[in-house]
Amino acid sequence: MSKLPNIIYIYADDLGRGMLSCYGQKHFETPNIDSIANDSVLFRHFYGCAFCAPARASLISGIHDAHAGRWSLTRAGIYIGLSNGTMTYDKIRELINNTGIEARADDVFLGNMAREAGYVTGQIGKLEWGFSTTPERIKRHGWDYHYGYYDHQRCHGFYPPFLFENGEIIHIKGCEGNLGNGTAQTHFAFYGNLDFDYGLSGIGDGATL
């Protein structure tokens, strides 16, 4: 079995350190996150953009968001076209994959680096790049497994009609008629010695999250 430690990186969109009691916030308590922080690493000197899409792009690329011409923001809401019948999945993928600034051949992303270090990688939750993405882009960024959203706009509600698992559309029972948005804005990236069943079973020594 691999001796590499499992790494779970939770990235909460638009959440500042002043909102967590583990960073000294005194107005309310965040005990569950605090308990994770007590057994983990707290970063106290860092930079992050105040706008979600470039902040996510900086996280996985390591490139400061003030660098012009390194990425572009894809269109939000495009996947709603699957619900209202105005676009097909293939057409959406073709459009996203052939517009905007694409990754260069020598670009290295967070997932790529983890894979090179011997990890199996996964990304769960809100898409990790732009306002809309595709399974091809997620694979290019180094993720072996993905479950979640491909559309930023769908992340702003609670009842998405579908999510995506490794490029496959997963319909959510009871939400099929919802033409609007999705659910909470949280990234859950993990890199480890993984044995996937469905979701997050079998991480490392067999623990289940």
Image: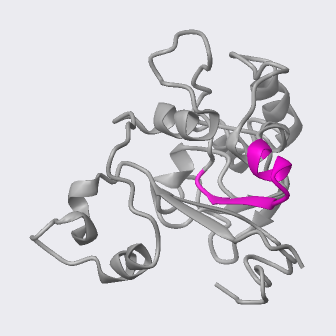
Is residue 100 highlighted in magenta?
no
Residue 176 position (above or below residue 56) = below
Q: Position of residue 81 (x, y in %)?
A: 69, 40
**Which residue lies at the image location 75% right of the left edge and 32% below the top edge?**
108
State which quarter of the image contains the C terminus.
bottom right
The single residue placed furthest to the top in the displayed view is 69
For residue 91, say whether it is visible: yes
In the image, the segment drawn in magenta is 112-126
**One can see residue 146 in this view:** no
User: Quadrant of the image for the N terminus?
Assistant: bottom right
Q: Quadrant of residue 162?
A: bottom right
Report if residue 122 lies within the magenta region.
yes
Q: Compared with residue 150, is residue 201 higher up or lower down, i.e. above or below?
A: below
x, y percentage for residue 95?
78, 24
Tell me where residue 205 sits by quadrant. Answer: bottom right
User: Does residue 69 appear left or right of residue 90 in this picture?
Assistant: left
Q: Is residue 12 above or below residue 201?
A: above
- For image coordinates 30% across by 82% down, the residue present is 31
Q: Residue at x 50, y 35 (%)?
A: 53
The image quadrant that residue 207 belongs to is: bottom right
Q: How far across and down, in percent of the image, does residue 101 sit?
A: 69, 16
Residue 142 placement (x, y as % from top left): 80, 45
In the picture as drawn, the residue positioned furthest to the front comes out as 3
Q: Is residue 34 left or right of residue 188?
A: left
- The coloring applied to the image is one colour
From this view, report whether residue 32 is shown above or below residue 42: below
Q: Is residue 135 left or right of residue 70?
A: right
Q: Nearer the viewer, residue 136 or 175?
A: 136
- The residue furthest left is 27
User: Residue at left 38%, top 33%?
Assistant: 49
